[in-house]
């Protein structure tokens, strides 16, 4: 079979783009930098959403919806937040079009200029904290634990499908608390939820840690992150959870009366993951034949392809396929029978490989005679012929095995690509030749961090939670350091 | 208990607004005309979404996501569509802010003007059909049956929570077909889905019918609608399904090769419902005490309120409540125990009445002794004391009874407020004194329709599907008419 994807070894970025397009996940649109998420890609995103949403609700959160538009003046209020966000964004200045007086088409009506421009939300802290001011008077009104599923816009110049797009889909949690401790606990809880989701559902191991001051979210006191390692040795920040202190409460004047009758500013967190997770999922497991999906996120977990020459054969095979499908569905397995006669089995095999369906069953006339089925695993590309009796139990176990197998494979890859390095020269050499996570000593200053970033394009991905203490010297300045931090080049 | 809502008889519009705010459904935001959908309101919307989404998938549709921004030039292509939509909309002209060189805050960077402006989608036919051009070559690629859940913006001057807001949430289905017949069938199927949802879940009877030419969606060949009657005698268009013919295919050049090898334009439909349904739901069933929710859309179907004086009593009552809750949950009933000690039972009763929880159970010390529970129905405000034994079965039946009861009440109201009228004078009199649906003869011309609209503010809501034929004379011009059509003043 001719390869439809550029091999990873040849050009990883091109392989990624080929896969996203050819597996029917997403494509670029007529609006620069905005993507169309195609049905198959959206079906995976829907599974991600549903599972995360359940996890948010189990941890006491409710959904709500806040406006797409934010008055420009809100961005002037939080100085740090402006620096981080307000620069590249979509600005709404007018509210009407009119027929072109000079001829065809429509033009912007100059008489319909807004007094104050609106910004299409790049994130919603400002408008939400402006709203919380009216919702919070007393400790009785706290905590507020709200999540929103929404689209956001950041005007990116260089975009890549799922990884960096002008418009993307995400969830943003925004919580309000009476105490500093409770807010910190919330930020930590949500990071754990993200890590659990990444590992148990995406089969993607992640490091949990703190961002350095210069890598923090604009307006945060502390940013927690989960960092994953992609197959090309680059890191991908997959989710962040921020302890915002009282910053937004001060700016938007959100105070509450304590049990003791004192007035205090409210403590805040925010946390989010986005369609970027789709990119992380693809680059964690897939191969030169296409997508490899963890069964727990696969819209189709098992596909059954009939192999036949004559019409009568098809009928009997489909009967058998339907029996198997019914048994699988009873175990909660998502199964599809592809009896479409427009395509040959070989074409279908390639297609389901490209789309990462975890298990493919093929049934031919000889299988009917022998009471067998051919079972193919997408992750290992291995095949075996098994008896049809008891197949549902076997497939159910196989799906668990695949889920665990691809997690272990990704974990092994990450462990093999995590290296301790003690000199700056070695650091550069490992970065260029191998990539991966590099554990090195750093003197703790933003100046050294910036120097390393400028010279090597590597950034500090995180200072791991409960990091092992180890006396050492900064690989650049030789100044004392009490712990190694995690460096990598990143998406 | 002091009334928290303006009574309907005093000011229906004010009652509606009071209810939306005080029941915690939604509120206005800092972005003019955009609302904040609060957690309780959003929980109802989520139930609506989930049920509709399942119905769409059962009828063969898949979800996808298309961009928020539409290039301005797309609106110049479909002349009729521009007339209907492009006038009042949010226009993005710039992509960057910068620090104000004259002092504090941020200003729009004049150097970051877009070459071509983007319109925030008011609906997505244009960008979707521009995309379908690349997806469709052959009859094998058809049909395409896609739905999108999204936010849209129409710059409304006068807004009302849920009913008419600048930004609102909706779903929009966009399908592509090889034949005219198939597209018409799709448009009809989706109208049936909407009607079924309105009647079976919202407990809201609807008329199904065709819009007249002047009330059609911009760019549609035929618009199908479901129309409901609100308590104040005004109609509310609750969902529309459009047969778009080949209009968008022609404008965006979407052709396909037929089985016979000919090239033809693709046939289209689109259909949508929005957060406006929340307004319809509220105005169909609620009363001066607050929201009345059909059990099938209630985020909490049963609330249990302990009545106690001493702490030991509370403990025993909560134990009993938990037993009941467990039994109810096993039947799939959504139940909440409110043992919050910050509020008195009377406050809680009023609160749950305001929020429309269908069934309230109260348990006091005497109930514990007697093995009883007080059951209160929100719809009829009636109460009875029942034995705790077998209560789950009783509640389950009661929820069905309530669902059916409020539907029947709404149906009776609609039937009593649907009147045949034969003269224009009587028409005006009924409109002013009673409102409701008025069945009258019309000569079929847009001129007469417009005259009636100008003079009475009544519009033709629809020409019912399978309308009864009846010879008559237009109530305005006296010209011959073969059927009555449905008039009303509308939201
Ligand atoms: Zn209170
Ligand atoms: Zn094909």
Image: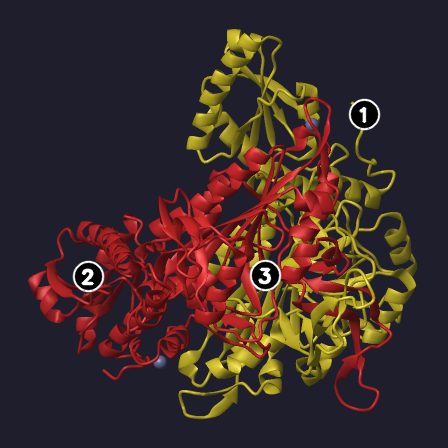
Chain colours: A red, B yellow
The numbered mark at residue A151 is 3
Name the residue beneath numbered marker 2: A320
Q: Is residue B100 visible?
A: yes
* Chain to which the residue tagged by mark 2 belongs: A
Distance from Cα at disc 1 to Cα at disc 2: 68 Å
Answer left or right for B139 relative to B483. left
* The C terminus of chain A: image quadrant: bottom left
Q: Is residue A69 above or below residue B478?
A: above
Please provide percent x and percent y for residue B226: 66, 59
Q: Choose mark 3 or mark 1, whichever is in front.
A: 3
Circle 2 packing at 10 Å, graded few (<14), some (14-19), many (20+), is some
Q: Choose mark 1 or mark 2, whichever is in front.
A: 1
Distance from Cα at disc 3 to Cα at disc 1: 42 Å
Is the same chain shared between marks 1 and 2? no
* The N terminus of chain A: image quadrant: bottom left
Circle 1 packing at 10 Å, graded few (<14), some (14-19), many (20+), is few
Name the residue beneath numbered marker 1: B2
């Amino acid at each position: 079979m001719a390869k439809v994807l550029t091999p990873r070894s040849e050009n990883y970025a091109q392989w990624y783009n080929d896969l996203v397009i050819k597996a029917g996940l997403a494509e670029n649109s007529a609006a620069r930098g905005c993507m169309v998420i195609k049905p198959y890609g959206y079906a995976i995103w829907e599974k991600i959403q549903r599972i995360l949403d359940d996890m948010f609700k189990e941890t006491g959160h409710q959904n709500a919806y806040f406006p797409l538009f934010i008055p420009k003046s809100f961005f002037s209020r939080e100085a740090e937040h402006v620096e981080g966000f307000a620069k590249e964004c979509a600005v709404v200045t007018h509210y009407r079009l009119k027929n072109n007086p000079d001829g065809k088409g429509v033009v912007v009506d100059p008489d319909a200029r807004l007094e104050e421009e609106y910004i299409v939300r790049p994130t919603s802290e400002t408008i939400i904290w402006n709203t919380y001011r009216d919702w919070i008077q007393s400790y009785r009104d706290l905590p507020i634990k709200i999540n929103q599923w929404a689209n956001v816009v950041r005007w990116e110049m260089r975009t890549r499908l799922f990884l960096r797009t002008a418009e993307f889909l995400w969830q943003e949690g925004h919580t309000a608390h009476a105490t500093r401790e409770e807010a910190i606990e919330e930020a930590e809880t949500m990071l754990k939820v993200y890590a659990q989701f990444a590992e148990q559902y995406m089969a993607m191991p992640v490091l949990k840690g703190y961002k350095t001051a210069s890598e923090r979210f604009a307006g945060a006191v502390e940013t927690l992150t989960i960092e994953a390692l992609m197959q090309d040795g680059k890191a991908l920040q997959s989710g962040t959870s921020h302890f915002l202190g009282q910053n937004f409460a001060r700016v938007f004047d959100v105070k509450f009366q304590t049990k003791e009758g004192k007035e205090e500013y409210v403590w805040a967190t925010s946390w989010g993951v986005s369609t970027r997770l789709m990119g992380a999922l693809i680059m964690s497991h897939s191969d030169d034949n296409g997508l490899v999906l963890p069964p727990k996120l696969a819209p189709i977990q098992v596909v059954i392809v009939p192999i036949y020459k004559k019409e009568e054969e098809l009928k009997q095979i489909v009967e058998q396929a339907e029996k198997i499908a019914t048994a699988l569905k009873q175990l909660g397995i998502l199964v599809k029978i592809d009896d479409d006669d427009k395509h040959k089995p070989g074409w279908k095999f390639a297609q389901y490989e490209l789309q990462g369906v975890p298990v493919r069953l093929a049934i031919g006339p000889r299988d009917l005679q022998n009471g067998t089925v051919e079972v193919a695993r997408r992750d290992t590309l291995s095949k075996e012929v098994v008896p049809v009796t008891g197949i549902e139990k076997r497939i159910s176990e196989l799906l668990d095995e695949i889920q665990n197998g691809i997690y272990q494979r990704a974990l092994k890859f990450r462990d093999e690509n995590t290296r301790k390095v003690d000199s700056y020269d070695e650091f550069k050499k490992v970065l260029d030749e191998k990539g991966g996570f590099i554990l090195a000593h750093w003197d703790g200053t933003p100046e050294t961090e910036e120097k390393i970033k400028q010279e090597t394009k590597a950034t500090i991905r995180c200072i791991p939670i409960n990091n092992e203490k180890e006396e050492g010297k900064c690989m650049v300045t030789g100044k004392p350091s009490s712990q190694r931090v995690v460096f990598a080049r990143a998406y």
